[in-house]
Amino acid sequence: MGSLYLAIIHYPVLDKRGEIVATSLTNLELHDVARSCMTFGVELCYIVTPLPKQAAIAEKLLDHWRSGYGARYNPDRARALTKIKIVRDLDEVMAEVRLKGNPMVIGTSSRAADNRLDYHGLRDQLLNEDRPFVLLFGTGWGLPPSVAGWCEKMLMPVCGQGEYNHLSLRVAIGIILDRLLGDRGGDHE
């Protein structure tokens, strides 16, 4: 079975005008994404931001929950937050993951792309290939072409019943992880 890594990109990402911007990290993002990663067996989730103050705030929050009072107060959350690592850029993510093997890099978007990969196909690859896989998630209005260029494929968007398609990143990650790594046996006690 392959190993799955996530990279949540806070820079560079697009704003609604299509300009390159940096987006803010949130405490809620760290906690919710960590719990999804722990639930579905993700190896590690990289939070990508080159902004020193945001990285410092995130590290302080992580320290509180992983080794400070928060760890004693809620050990389950402390365990889940070991799945989060703050890094400066995508180069750092790829250098670390390449130590584990030759990764397949897959982008995500709420918009359809030409080089699409469906969930069933990626799930099969994850289950049958012994290599790392990296899913890139763009915050804001998504990944710019410079980041999408890192991707071999783009995962099909999560779509609902109507035309509205603007899920929060935390919700989209949970849905995607369930589709890729969720138990499909249906037998839960």
Image: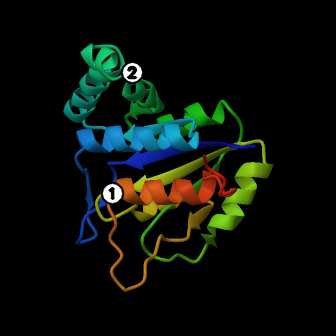
For the N terminus, the quadrant is: top right
Q: Is residue 168 above or below residue 46?
A: below
Front residue of 109/180: it is 180
- Mark 1, other Cα within 10 Å: few <14 / some 14–19 / many ≥20: many
Residue 151 visible in image: no
Q: Where is residue 57 in the image (x, y as percent from the top left)?
A: 21, 29
Element type at marker 2?
Answer: helix
| Image quadrant in which you'd find residue 120 | bottom right
Q: Which residue is drawn at 33% across and 23% down?
A: 74
Tell me: 113 left or right of 68. right
User: Looking at numbered disc 1 in the image, what kind of residue is underneath it?
Assistant: Val
Numbered mark located on residue 75 in the image? 2
User: Looking at numbered disc 2 in the image, what kind of residue is underneath it?
Assistant: Pro
- Mark 2, other Cα within 10 Å: few <14 / some 14–19 / many ≥20: some
Tell me: 97 left or right of 16. right
The answer to whether marks 2 and 1 mark residues whose Cβ atoms lie closer than 8 Å is no
- Of callouts 2 and 1, which one flags the residue occurring earlier in the amino acid sequence? 1
| Image quadrant in which you'd find residue 77 | top left
Judged from this view, the residue extending furthest toward the front is 189
Q: Is residue 91 above or below residue 65?
A: below
Q: Which residue is drawn at 26% across and 43% down?
A: 28
Q: In this view, does 106 lie above or below 17?
A: above
Front residue of 118/115: it is 118
> Where does label 1 land, which residue?
13
Tell me: 17 left or right of 77. left
Q: Position of residue 186 (x, y in %)?
A: 65, 58
Q: Where is residue 37 in the image (x, y as percent from the top left)?
A: 49, 41
Front residue of 105/4: it is 4
Q: Where is residue 3 in the image (x, y as percent from the top left)?
A: 66, 40
Residue 74 visible in image: yes
